[in-house]
Image (cartoon, rainbow, N blue to C red):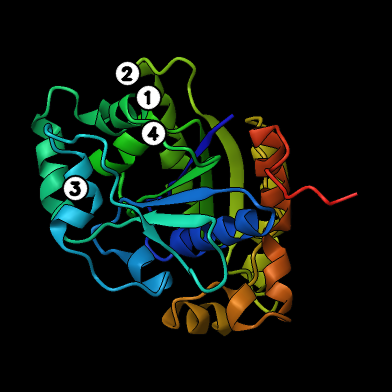
Amino acid sequence: MQVRLAVISNAGGSGKTTLSVHLAYELALHKYEVALFDLDPQGSLTLFCGLQPPEPEETLAAVLKDNFDGSWPLTPCWSKHTDKVVLCQGGMVLTQTADELVLHKRGAYLLGDCLTDYPLKQELIIFDCPATLGPLPLMALAACTHVIIPVQLEPKSIQGAAHLIEWYYYHCKHLRLNPSPEIMGFVPNQYNSQRGTHRQILAALPEQLKQINLRAFPEIRDSAEFVNASGQGLPIHLYRPSHPARGDFKAITSELINLIGKPANKTKKKK
């Protein structure tokens, strides 16, 4: 099974790109192939993956043109360390693309159409969405099989996530998505155990989500090393191999491997 995971949040700074990068690298460590898609006009994945800003024809914007012929503009990530991760880059050109999607007769379905017409071989595709609930996240919703929601442990962020859930159910029905993408769960992000508000919200979140049949994954800690690593264009595994934060993504990684549902292609040992 190819899993297409949309990382969606309507709040800036919720850690979407950090989550996308580290899930991609974790799956690569398990020998799965991953394609990252940057749906954010800010192009954060380009920075986080240590790549140079692309030309417009080398971005997702080119894929969403009516004349797209299946030549996916995929750039290898961290090629000195892995051959399992590629990136379809974003950038400011997606601002114009978002406006065009509103007018396109299949705007919300366009990315899903491309993936149907020109399938990718990767077992996992990750859509890193902008911090809005506009045309680009809507397109990701229509193309994905699963959704994951990173949230900061702040009252405003939690309230925004409740609005996102309403948006999800409305558009699954409005777009007639069948089957609707499954919400994997919420990811508490940038957790600081020294902050009482963070501890209180984290303690209450699992029970609150259980009432609507959703899961809370283990928290991802607040660490300056994530910022430092992203500035170098590396996941924390490569920037600080012994840092304990690298273990924060294990539960989500295990769930993704279960969803893919088959062993990765590993080299057989000689007898």
Tell whether label 2 touches label 1 (CB within 8 Å). yes
Which of the marked residues, 1 or 4, is nearer the chain's N terminus? 4
- Real-space Cα distance between discs 2 and 3? 25 Å
Residue at the spot of label 4: 141
Position of the N terminus by quadrant: top right
Query: Residue at 62% of width from left, 48% of height from top?
Result: 32
As helix, strand or loop, the secondary structure at mark 1 comes to helix
Mark 3 is surrounded, within 10 Å at the Cα level, by few (under 14), some (14 to 19) or many (20 or more) other residues, namely: many
Residue 5 spot, x, y in % from top left: 50, 41
Q: Is residue 143 left or right of residue 198?
A: left
Q: In the image, which disc is placed on residue 150?
A: none
Residue at the spot of label 1: 170
Tell me the amino acid under the disc marked 3. Answer: Ala
Which of the marked residues, 2 or 3, is nearer the chain's N terminus? 3
As helix, strand or loop, the secondary structure at mark 4 comes to helix
Residue 148 spot, x, y in % from top left: 53, 44
Q: Nearer the viewer, mark 4 or mark 3?
A: 3
Tell whether label 4 touches label 1 (CB within 8 Å). no
Query: Residue at 50% of width from left, 75% of height from top?
Result: 234
As helix, strand or loop, the secondary structure at mark 2 comes to helix
Tell me if residue 235 comes above or below residue 104 in the rendering: below
- Real-space Cα distance between discs 1 and 4? 12 Å
Q: Nearer the viewer, mark 2 or mark 3?
A: 3
Q: Is residue 17 left or right of residue 254?
A: left
| Frontmost residue, 79 versus 111 | 79
Which of the marked residues, 1 or 3, is nearer the chain's N terminus? 3
Residue at the spot of label 3: 61
Tell me the amino acid under the disc marked 2. Answer: His
Residue at the spot of label 2: 174
